[in-house]
Structures are given as structure tokens and as C-alpha cells.
Amino acid sequence: MYRLTVRDHMMIAHSLPHPAFGPAQQLHGATYVVELAIDRAELGEKGIVIDIGEATGLLRDALADLDYTNLDDHPELAGVLTTTETLARVVAERVAGRLPAGTYAGLEVTLREHPDAWATYSLPLS
Amino acid sequence: MYRLTVRDHMMIAHSLPHPAFGPAQQLHGATYVVELAIDRAELGEKGIVIDIGEATGLLRDALADLDYTNLDDHPELAGVLTTTETLARVVAERVAGRLPAGTYAGLEVTLREHPDAWATYSLPLS
Amino acid sequence: MYRLTVRDHMMIAHSLPHPAFGPAQQLHGATYVVELAIDRAELGEKGIVIDIGEATGLLRDALADLDYTNLDDHPELAGVLTTTETLARVVAERVAGRLPAGTYAGLEVTLREHPDAWATYSLPLS
Amino acid sequence: MYRLTVRDHMMIAHSLPHPAFGPAQQLHGATYVVELAIDRAELGEKGIVIDIGEATGLLRDALADLDYTNLDDHPELAGVLTTTETLARVVAERVAGRLPAGTYAGLEVTLREHPDAWATYSLPLS
Amino acid sequence: MYRLTVRDHMMIAHSLPHPAFGPAQQLHGATYVVELAIDRAELGEKGIVIDIGEATGLLRDALADLDYTNLDDHPELAGVLTTTETLARVVAERVAGRLPAGTYAGLEVTLREHPDAWATYSLPLS
Amino acid sequence: MYRLTVRDHMMIAHSLPHPAFGPAQQLHGATYVVELAIDRAELGEKGIVIDIGEATGLLRDALADLDYTNLDDHPELAGVLTTTETLARVVAERVAGRLPAGTYAGLEVTLREHPDAWATYSLPLS
């Protein structure tokens, strides 16, 4: 199995309005360093999983309307606790929806929120 | 599948008394940068795998009696070759023993001993 | 000359309301990974620049009322463009105000806002 | 399952002569930081997956005739598009060919070509 | 003193035709991760050393005709040993030539060629 | 001014027998990732500060009798508090003693003891 990973980042504000989150209930923010990994069983004629530029573009497109915003105001995320785990799934599903069917085995999105914590969402693709 | 990873470190002395280990048979030491990854199939109502503070606490508890010690003197490790692989398993089993049954799919512990070598132990949880 | 550096981080929301900042005029956020370096010409009897725990505490104290907040609402920062450079100076001056006179040669604070950009403020101490 | 990972690097020139690769069709180069991960279900009597020195030697041997060369001139790679994915497989297969049968569960090779892109090849070993 | 640093990279082929360089006399290559630091004594009204986007653009412009090329064929570098140190100076002088006089105190360019070696060139600006 | 930096590491045991060091008074250990930076005003005819292999060798030689040992038993360090700062100076002075006079402007040694703390010693060379 082959995997190609590309990296980008986004800088967002948000709050986590649930008593379990302590000070993170307040409006604060994060730089999320985002890694998108795409899996493929066999390489195509160009010897690649996916073009790095194309993968980078898919990731950028998935982050574009989140980057430099307050996630608390994003219509798609209304009522959602925008935890790192949840955002990893949102990014992964956005990318998956743009990939052609039948080529890729799966994808995995990791969001690093600070040097000592990160979350990953893995999505098998049939 | 979701994964939440947290990171801590410990600074230990030890020796590896087996001829295969060359100079590491002598008493020496290591900073182990330790990553604890916890897997879960679905998020709970708070949108998280596990609270980052709770995961960090579980990892710290698992390292506490090892950190700033000479592992050669630790009763639990008497007669054990405290290789990076073995310590990864010890940390993983300590954390696993503190997690509630039935919630998590597995965990993985990585110990980085220097920039060019690290070891991982993966433990499925039923 | 000796230098001791410790690292922490803070997760803040803010906006940069000046047309030069493009999308960063909007409310967004950042994880700032913060490094505090303290310089000293000669070591004391304990062979250290400053105790690592003490330096870590000084840095944490300097970040505490900023971490997990929206800097746009912070009284001390009212009317201030909270650029990375400016925040580096704020943190440095807070730490400097807590250090005893005559012992240290200077300090330097670096704030890393994402993998490809960071800012530093250097402050000589007489 | 246990995994031991070691890291090395190689500095190569190459070109990717297919229109899909844009400027990378030109002769250019890369520092590939290479990680070799070896998996094993149970540890042997020494408490290790494989000796770190031995794993490091296997990786170095797999890179030796590629390092400090122009891959376009390498006989084994004639007519091959030396993408990061393909090179990951070449390195993995070279290492696999040197490992004894029946001991290891698999291996994985990652080549990091720059801070924002890397490729991995996973090879199960029966 | 304030410093703003931005990071980019370039992927080049080259050779170092002098017996002192051993295997690096052969055509090989490198990913140079390049950091550009710009120093300024006081911040302007926007509270910045220089706009991050502008600094990133200056660095990209300085790398553009080197990236994805064989430096051995570059007219400006004919007869030059393109060591990491020399390339750091070339990049620094290109950036310095584009900066307005009288605003900045200096700049520093670091080229990282692999995880265990890097070179820096510092250029004071009057 | 030019600077060339190389990196190595050592894995040592030690204790810091002074009440100020808390748990570090116990025998414990560290992986010190060590960076050696050498400064030079002008490059020689080979376009380098110093050969990377030579610098790497100087650093390795300076670490060799410390690596894989218990520093508490080292004759040269008897009665010395082997803090990170002190070890940085020991390494720097060892390297300085091996460099020819009159060529280099200075050197700087950084020892990273864990991801959140490191120490540096700078030594001007006339």
C-alpha cells in the first residue's frame, strides 16, 4: 500500500461551549497544522498515488472557508462542538467528496493543535 | 476511526546488560519523548475521543514512577531488559489498565529515544 | 555567554484591524508556541543560568491571562495591533519585569505562529 | 504489535520526464529523509524488534548506491519515474530482501522530500 | 530588536567539483529548507517588522530561478562552488537588494540541507 | 558572517546533587541532542566555513567519552554539577581546543535535553 501525505495549516478562532472543556469554553483560537494522507493500493502510470499539487489543492480547498475565520460563526458548524477530532472528520469528508470513486483505498487527516496534542480521522474508501 | 494523541517525556537512567547491546550495556540514560494515541470508532456527545487533559493525566501517571529514576533499580523492572520496545509496552499496559472497558478501540505508545530511532507498541482493546 | 531556553504555548483568538492584514482583519486565532531565552555571562554556584522550573514558571505567568482568550477583549491590549512581533515584546517585557536586576544579560522571546513564520523580540538587560 | 523505526537520509539528483510533473521534469534534486519501520508481533529474548544498529545498517545499505548520485543514470532505475512513492518501494523491497523470513510482520518506508510532502510504502511480510 | 522569520524551500541538483567534497563531487541534489530572518530596531505603525506575505514573496522571488534546476547550469553560478554557505549568501544578497534602505537592521538566511547540517549567512544592513 | 551547524546526540546518565534540583538529584538520564555552530567571517577557497565531515568529526570526538556513560563517574567531571549549561561549555571548549587559531570567529554549542528546554554556550574565538 502506498500513502502520499501533504501538509497545510489554518488559523481559526472558536469556543467549545460545554462545561467539560474548562477554559476552552471561552473564545480562543488555534493554528491547526493539517496533514492529509491518501492511500492507494497500486500506483498509476505516472508512478504516483496522486499529484502532490493536486493533493495540496484539495487540502487547501477543504480549509479555505475555515481559515482566518471564527468557526463559531460558520453556518455549516452551527451547534457543532468544533473539537480537533470533529474538524479532522470535516476536512476528511470534504476531501473524500472531491476524490473520484474506485481509485483510492482511504484517507487520513491529522490536525495538530499544539506540540503536545493532535487528532486524526481515518476514512476507508471502498 | 478517530485517534487522539498526547505527548510527554521522561528522563531516565538504565543499562542493557546483554552483550548484543555494546556500549549500551553500560549505565547511561535517555530522554524518552512519549506519545500516547487512543483510538475510538465514534465520538461521544462532547465530540472527543477522550479529554486531552484526561489523556495527558493518564500518560503522566504512567510515567511518574519512572521519570527521574534509574530503571535498573525499579522493582517492577527487575530482570527486565528495559529496551525502548519493552518500555513502550509497559506504558501502554499501564494506560490500558486505567481505561474503561468497551469505549476505546485500541491504543498505541511511541517512545522516541533520539532523533533517528523510536519504538512503538500497539494494543488493540476489545 | 550562556543561554537557557524554555518553551510553552498559548491558544488565542484575535483580529488585526488594519487593511494591510487582508484576511487576518477577521476574527481568527493562533497557537503561539513561545520560546523564552535568558542570557547570563557567568553561571552561579548551581551551574545554571536560571532554574528550568523557575524559567518555565515565569513564562507561564506571562502567558496565563492571554491563553484561551480573545486578545481583542484584553484591557491591556486595547487599541493595540496584536501582531506576533508585538506579542513577543509584551511577553518579553512581562518576564523582564519579574527578573532580578543585575544577574542576566538579556532575554529573547520567539513566538511561532505556524510552521513557516515566527517573530522574535530581543531585550538587553543592563 | 511492536514497531522499531530508524531514520537516515540521502541527497540525490533526478528528473521526472512526464508532462504531469511541470517544473520537476527538469533535472533537480532532493534530500530524502528516510524512515524505515519494522513490525514484529512478539519481541525476542533481547526484548527488541531488531537491533537499532542492524536496522540502521540495513537502511544505509539500501540507500548507499543512490546517495550522492543522479538517479537518472542509475541502471536499476532506467526508464522508471523516480517519484517519491516509487523510491519508497525500492528502498522497502531492498530491505525486505535482506530480512530473514518468518520473523517480521511487515515494514514501512517513508521518504520525506520537503516539510510539506512525504510518501510511504507499506509491505506486509508473511 | 525585532526579527521576523519566514520559511520556504527549494529542490536543486548540483555538484561540488573540488576533491575536498568526496562523493559530493558527483552530481547529486538537495532539498534546501530556507529561512529568511529580517531584523528591525523598531516596529512601524502596523506593529510589524515586515508584512509576512511580503517577506514570503521576497524569499520566493530569491529562490525562483534556482528551484527545480541544476545549479551547475545556472549562468550566475558558473565557476562557483555552490556550497550551502555560498547559496545562503546568494539568497541573502538577492533579498537585501530588494529591501528599501534605512528601514532594516540586517537579515540572516539559513539553508538546512539535511536534519544534521545547516548553514547561515548574516548580513548587517546600515 | 557565516555559520555552519552540525548535529549529533549523546545518551548519558547523571545526577545533580544539589537541593535546588528536586527529583533531578536522583540518578536519571538524558538524550542530549547537540548542535555545534562554527562562525567565520569569510569563506576559504572551497566556499565553506569548515568541512561538514570535519565539523561532525570534531563534535563526535568531543562527545565520545561522555556518550553511553554515567557522567557521575567521569574523572574530568568529578565534583561538577553536570547541568545542561555546564555540559554545553565542556563540549564547546573541547571543540575550541581542536580548532586552528585565527580562522574562526567563534562557536556555539546547544544541548537540547527535552522538547521544552535547551541550553547554549557561546565562545568567541579571537
Image: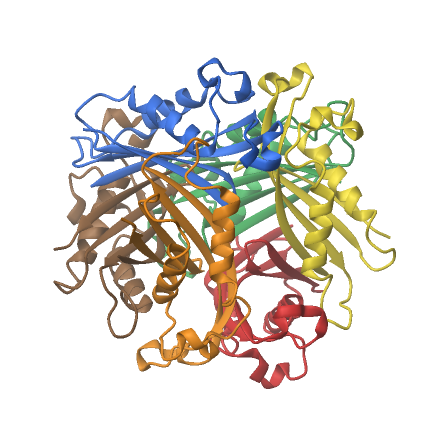
Chain colours: A blue, B orange, C yellow, D brown, E green, F red
The image position of residue C54, as x and y in percent, is 72, 57
The image position of residue E71, as x and y in percent, is 41, 39
Q: Is residue C48 left or right of residue D70?
A: right
**Residue lying furthest bottom in this view?**
F75
Q: Residue at x 48, y 41 (%)?
A: B51
**Residue lying furthest front in this view?**
B101
A29 versus C99 height, above or below? above
Placement of the C terminus of chain F among the 4 image quadrants: bottom right
A8 versus A118 height, above or below? above
The image position of residue E33, as x and y in percent, is 48, 42
Q: Is residue F24 left or right of residue B81?
A: right
Q: Residue at x 45, y 41 (%)?
A: A118
F102 versus A68 height, above or below? below
Residue F51 seen: no
Residue B111: quarter of image: bottom left
| Numbered label tally | 0
Q: Residue at x 46, y 22 (%)?
A: A80
In-front residue for pair C84/F116: F116
In-front residue for pair C14/D19: C14
Q: Residue at x 49, y 33 (%)?
A: A32
Residue C125 seen: yes
The image position of residue E44, as x and y in percent, is 76, 26
In-front residue for pair F106/F68: F68
In-front residue for pair A78/A95: A78
Residue F93: quarter of image: bottom right
